[in-house]
Image: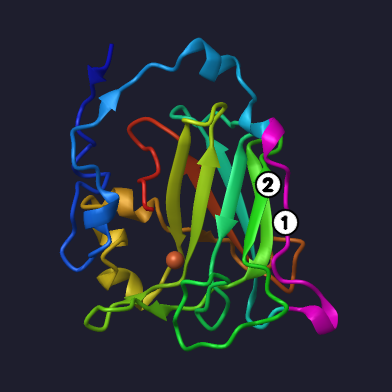
Amino acid sequence: MAIRIERRAAATQAQGIEPGYAQTARRWPSQPLVLRPHTPSELSGPQVQRCLPEIRGDLAGYGERRALGQLIRLRVRVVDEDGAPLPGTVVEAWHCNAAGKYIHPNDSHDAPVDPNFYGAARLAAGDSGLVELRTIKPGAYPVPDTNGWWRPPHVHFSVWGRVWLSRLVTQMFFPGEPLNDADAILNAIRDPEARSRCIARLVPAGRSPHFNELVYDYQLVVRGRKASPGMP
Ligand SMILES: [Fe+2]
């Protein structure tokens, strides 16, 4: 039997249709959410980790085949509500190139394609819940059919749980970006502290063996009071 579930925490999760963010009208459930317990077949069926192979941890390439842009390394830890690592979790990441262009047929932005940029990765977290992605810093891009809204640089993440019904889709932002302050998606999270958890932390230069890459640390929290906000 379906059980009605609590509303999302108002301060730390987006609540519905956001002014200036037209897509929320299509992405927000029109009916109250219900909790449907997983069935035995869902729990015993093929596990996500066995069905989704890893696809590259490097979107930037090397030498003559290196993507344009500033090299970065994202060190993403996947943890539960107690901060315990979740090894084996499948993490998908995708973002636009340094000019703000996605590798996607629906991207109509008049920005150049980068033939050496790979736009997406899928990785399994290691024993400490860590996923490392070498890539370039994504550019900002204008949102079509809006009055001058530009998305700040960001990286999309999809985190798969053990079964197919368990998935978190969210976005990571970069510190110090002026466009962060006006972004309708980031600011759909009302609580400044919760918003700050959506922003990666720059590792001080020199504290990483990867001297030609700026290193960012980030944490994906899959549930609980400090769960990463859902941002489709
Ligand atoms: Fe995006």
Q: Secondary structure at mark 2?
A: strand
Tell me whether circle 1 and circle 2 mark residues in contact (CB < 8 Å): yes
Q: Quadrant of residue 182?
A: bottom left
Residue at the spot 23% in from the left edge and 65% down from the top edge: 22
Q: Secondary structure at mark 1?
A: loop
Q: Is residue 49 left or right of residue 103?
A: right
Q: Is residue 34 left or right of residue 101?
A: left
Q: The residue under label 2 is which amino acid type?
A: Leu
Residue holding disc 1 = 57
Residue at the spot 23% in from the left edge and 24% down from the top edge: 5
Graded by Cα atoms within 10 Å as few (under 14), some (14 to 19) or many (20 or more), the crowding at tag 2 reads many
Q: The residue under label 1 is which amino acid type?
A: Gly
Q: Report the magenta residues as a range.
A: 50-66
The stretch drawn in magenta includes residue 99: no
Image quadrant occupied by the N terminus: top left
**x, y percentage for residue 205?**
64, 69
**x, y percentage for residue 204?**
59, 65
Where residue 123 is drawn, which disc sits there? 2
